[in-house]
Image (tube, coloured by chain):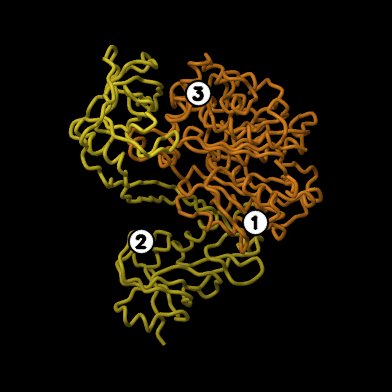
Amino acid sequence: MHAAPDTYAIDLPALHSELAMPYTLTPGRAAGTFLAEIGKRRIIGSRFASGLTIAPAEDFSPTDGESDFEFVEVPATGVLTAFTQVGGDIIGLIRLDGCDNDFPHHIVEAEFGKLATGVRVEAVWAEGVENSILAITGFRPAPGTPIGKARPAGDTAAPVTVILYTMKLHYEHAYGPYYARLFDEIRTNRRIMGVRTSDGDTALLPPREIDDITHRRTGTWKACKDTGTIRACSIINMEFLGQTRPPPYVYAEIVLDGASTRLIHMITIDSVEAAKTRIKPGTRVRAIWRKGEREGSLRDIERFEVIDG
Amino acid sequence: MTTAGLNRVAVVASAQTELRPAWRNAQHIDLISSVVADVFKGTGLTLHDVDFVIDSGSDVLDGRSISNCGFLGALGAHHKEESRVEEDGLWAALYGVNKIRSGASSVGLIVAYSKPSESNVDAYWSSMVEPFYQRPVSFGQRAASGIQAQRYCAEHGTTLRALAELTASRWRAAVEHGTVAIDSVPSADTVLASPDAAVPLKEMMLARPVDGAVAVLLAREDIARRAARTPVWVTGMGTSLDAHSFAARTPGRLSSCEMAAKMAFRKAGWSADSADVAEVSAASVVGELMVLESLGLAGPGRGLAAATGGRTRVNASGGALPADPIMATGLVRLAHAARQLALPELYGLDRPTRAIAHGTGGVGMQNHCVFTLGI
């Protein structure tokens, strides 16, 4: 299994791709209050009805889910309960004075080889950082620091309600031999190549080794035409994240002549009203290839347009 | 607890690609369709006999959401009942076994795959931790593994040299039985000379992410007896989840592994000391020792002795240290454990009858799944 295509193997470098997801994170009451207070150098924890005291603050007890709690202010001193070093960065678990839980943070101003569990530590505060646990740069060894106590927090600031956050993930996607030939042919020959289904003459696009429906080996390669028929479409007249062109345009699922599967592409339009009558399932379209440098992707087709008549 | 009226379920066959640091010339669908086509060979069963497909993989590692929808054809799931488990593939097998046990289905195809080479594994783990308190301070899988190791070595006096020797022996086993791509088998000195990863752990003491796919075919008793040369019965299953916050878990223990094992052994009616074979997953070499101890194969701090010299043959496939196809590692363990019972001659084993397969997931091995197998 997993054979190369029957003509020639092409080893394209991987496709670089980035996913950047914007989030509006909701910290909730407890974390929101902790984040609102930490810029003022106050560490807010939760004391549950059972007596369990934890910091940083949480809405629910991590051990039994209890939600009845009051805010406490806990000291910026505690002990190191475990540690490791990743890269140049020492990460430790800290138990703040008066608390029953550990939490991870950076250990700073310390020599790794001289660290030991049980050592007293104190917070090192960052300048000008708000609404983040990084308002504390980290914890440093502070032998002999007096042991503090958690006490009622009194009035607390209004909780931070939203934290803007973007998760960026990078990928290097392998093409594999089938997609590699598809995109190489698009770049080199402006030709859209599929492979025949396992039991027929029409082509699957994109090409693949195994026919999705029969789960048998697909057939030989076949060049599809760059003309085809719309089988489904939607007129897009709104903006959204991830769009590749400004609206309005038509999103279309097109069966190219010679293929049996739908290719997703775009049809540019001048008027939404005219598109409503002109573009529909059954409408014949042709690819308009992009001028200039070819990149070996579906972007080499600039758009599809309606074949008049 | 009565099991009357429930079907017995067996592992009929399995198939696995080579596990490589990177399958650069293949897509996910290529790896998946390869094992799906392979798993039926010799069984007499075909895809037509399959009632359902359950698959495991990570959308974050794949770089697309609901990625199984794009892989349905490769999975052999066209117009079939298909379901995705966003956990290690051993949980997919648990789901599949229960579907057959209940009488709802007869034959199930379980598939897990991984291509971490296309992504950033540290970012994948980072995406799993809590975003307000933990992610900003760079807490992730490495830190959790390092802290586990620091605690374990401090408590039990385990030396780095001993950890390196165990690691090297796992790589040797992987070359022999694991179908793992390895250029040269490292010595203990090579392991010790690899860079610090999460002190005290060296880079090679962490599970090595690899690409690959695995498929396991499950069937009801009467079908399994016709299709499999030696049906391998699933005699017990257990699963347990620990607290999401690593710091909130009991230090020095894998409580959820202990609970999952207890659940599986209760169903099986036997305990770890009568297992002939164990295939276990782990995030690090210390993680593997902690799993062996949590399963009951060794007392606290005694995992090293059980890892290589105990009554139970542990990780004849090499386990997760030389090859960790994230999200598929536990299902690979099930495939190897079943193979060792069905084809002991390939492993130099003398009539083994009982096996344990173990999978884990989450930062710092939060979740555990344990299978007991018998012939």
Q: Are marks 2 and 3 in contact (CB under 8 Å)?
A: no
**Which image quadrant for residue B186?**
top right
Chain A, which colour?
yellow
Task: For mark 1, give the secondary structure.
Answer: strand
Q: Residue furthest bottom?
A: A309
Quadrant location, the N terminus of chain B: top right
From the viewer's perspective, is residue B271 above or below residue A166? Answer: above
Mark earlier in primary sequence (1, 3): 1
Question: Within 10 angstroms of label 3, few (less than 14), some, or many (20 or more) residues?
Answer: some
**Residue kind at label 1, given as amino acid type:** Phe
Spatial separation of the CA atoms under disc 1 and disc 3: 40 Å
Mark 1 vs mark 3: in front: 3
Which residue carries the number 2 mark? A293
Residue B140 coordinates in the image, percent (x, y)? 42, 34
Chain B, which colour?
orange
Image disc number at residue B52: 1
**Which image quadrant for residue B46?**
bottom right
Q: Are the residues under marks 2 and 3 on the same chain?
A: no
- Nearer-the-camera pick, B293 or A237: B293
Residue B139 coordinates in the image, percent (x, y)? 39, 33
Q: Residue at x 61, y 55 (%)?
A: B75
Image disc number at residue B252: 3
Q: Residue furthest front?
A: A49
Residue B217 coordinates in the image, percent (x, y)? 69, 49
Question: Within 10 angstroms of label 1, few (less than 14), some, or many (20 or more) residues?
Answer: many
Mark 2 vs mark 1: in front: 1
Task: For mark 3, give the secondary structure.
Answer: loop
Residue B363 as seen in the image, left or right of residue B178: left
